[in-house]
Every structure is written in structure tokens, then in C-alpha cells.
Image: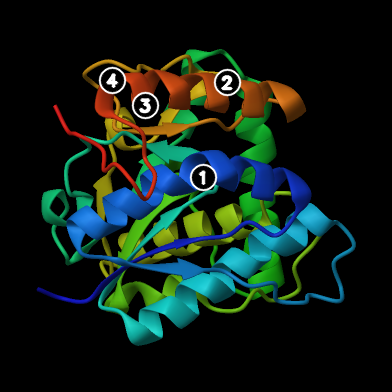
Amino acid sequence: MTSRAIATIALDEPGAAQAAVTRPFLDLYAERVGADIVDGRFHDHPEITKRFTQIQLSKLDTMREALEQYDRVLWLDVDVMVRPDAPDIFEVIPDNKWAGREEIAIFMAQNKFWRYEQIIEHMETVCRQEGIGPLNRNRAIYFNCGVQLAAKQHAFLYAPAKNPDDWDWAEQTRVSVRVCLAADAGRLEVYYLPDAFNSMKYAGELNYGRTCWFNHYCGMQGADRLIHMQMDAEVWRKRYGRPNNDQRLRAG
């Protein structure tokens, strides 16, 4: 078996509170699929003033460093909760493909055309900052990087950010731009994750029954996010068993 890791990061108080809920489920999943867990650390970006943006950019560094040690690395945001009977994503996705959930289709389905324009404009800004491109607007793809799976050959997607701005999703936009350009150039094959592996509350997709394996609580604000996570975790504990040192979760 190739070496595997699951990387995540929790560097502020809200992240720590979310990790208290999601980490027991993550630990058990990692054990089941034979993956180490890599806890991301803070990387200072002195040109950035927003703490959230600095944390996001630290994800690039965490993934790049993890791929120096492991053949494949799955990234999970701290607000992603893995269902106890989720399949082994490393076995589902071919190891030659980078995997992420495409997000523009969600915005368009919700008639959020302003959001589409905002994202495309920031992708073009990133191209200028990085000195890459040009971006083909008609072929632009934007990924939600709360769940992404990469192999060693994809480490270039996580190169240090050049001239980053204070835009909240500076990391996610950079990965999306680099994926788009590499795919257009024939240097990268993409596996488009189904919503089951990145089921997002803001898209109205969370389903705690049979179809969604990774529930992602993005788009929820403050205490509401944590409350929903805690409620759903309790549902899973009742169904599968309590994830602690005394009792392992029961799949099925």
C-alpha cells in the first residue's frame, strides 16, 4: 500500500471547537483506511493582515510539506465530518488524478451570478499575482478545497503563494487556477468529486442517511455551525456507537 495521510488544520478558537467534534470521527476513519494524520501548523505570511487568510494560505504549505513525506494526501477542513461507514476514498479515486469538488455549478444553480463573477475576477487577479496564465474564462473551473486528494506529482499545485492579497479564499483560488491551467495544458487529470465526498450545507445537500459520506459545514455562521455539527455528531453516535477510546464505531 502506498503511504497515505490525511491533513487538516485548526489554528484558532472556532477551529479548535469544531475539531473537538469532528476529530474523533476523523481519527477512526484514518485508522480504518491506513492513513497518518498531519496536523497543519501556522506559516506566517507577513504581507497578509487577515488571520483567516493566513490560515488558508497555511493549507498550501501543509499540503506541500505532507506530499514530501507521503505518496497521497487527503485534505479535510476542520469543519468536515466523516461518516463512520464512509468508503475508503483512496481506493475510490485513481492515484494519478487530483480530486476536488467543482463549485461554480452550485452557484449557477442558485442564481448566484454575482458570486461567479467575483470568483472569476479573483482567479484573474491570482494569475497576475503569480505571473501565470492567461485564464480562459470559458473553461474556468473553481473547486471547493475543503476536501481534496492529491498525490506526489501534484505537489506543484501547492507551491508557495506569490504576492497574495487579503482575499479570504486565497488558497482555494490559487489551487483552482493552477488546476485549470495544468489541466488545459494536459499536465493534470482531474477527478470531479461527487457531493457524497463533499456534501455542503450551503448547497442544501447534507444528508445523514445513505448518500453523503463527508459532511462539510461551510457557509454556516459562527455558533450555528458548531451547533449543527454537535447535533449531527450525536445522531451518528446513536447510530454507529460512540467514537472514543472505549468503544469503536460500528459501520453499517
Q: Position of residue 162 (x, y in %)?
A: 69, 76
Q: Which of disc 3 and disc 2 is earlier in sequence?
A: 2
Q: Residue furthest bottom?
A: 68
In the picture of the structure, the residue carrying the numbered disc 4 is 239
Query: Please, what is the three-letter code of the amino acid marked with disc 4?
Result: Arg
The relative height of residue 162 versus residue 236 in the rendered view (above or below) is below
Residue 106 percent across, percent down from the top left: 47, 24
Tell me which amino acid carries mark 3. Arg
The residue indicated by pointer 1 is 137
Answer with mark 4 or mark 1, whichever residue precedes in sequence: 1
Q: Residue at x 23, y 21 (%)?
A: 211
Q: Position of residue 148 (x, y in %)?
A: 38, 53
Q: CA distance from mark 3 to mark 1?
A: 45 Å
Residue occupying image coordinates x 51% and y 45%: 137
Tell me the SS state at disc 2: helix
Q: Which residue is mark 3?
A: 237
Q: Is residue 8 left or right of residue 72?
A: right
The residue carrying mark 2 is: 228
Q: Position of residue 18 (x, y in %)?
A: 61, 41
Separation of marks 2 and 3 at Cα, in angstroms: 14 Å
Q: Nearer the viewer, residue 139 or 105?
A: 105
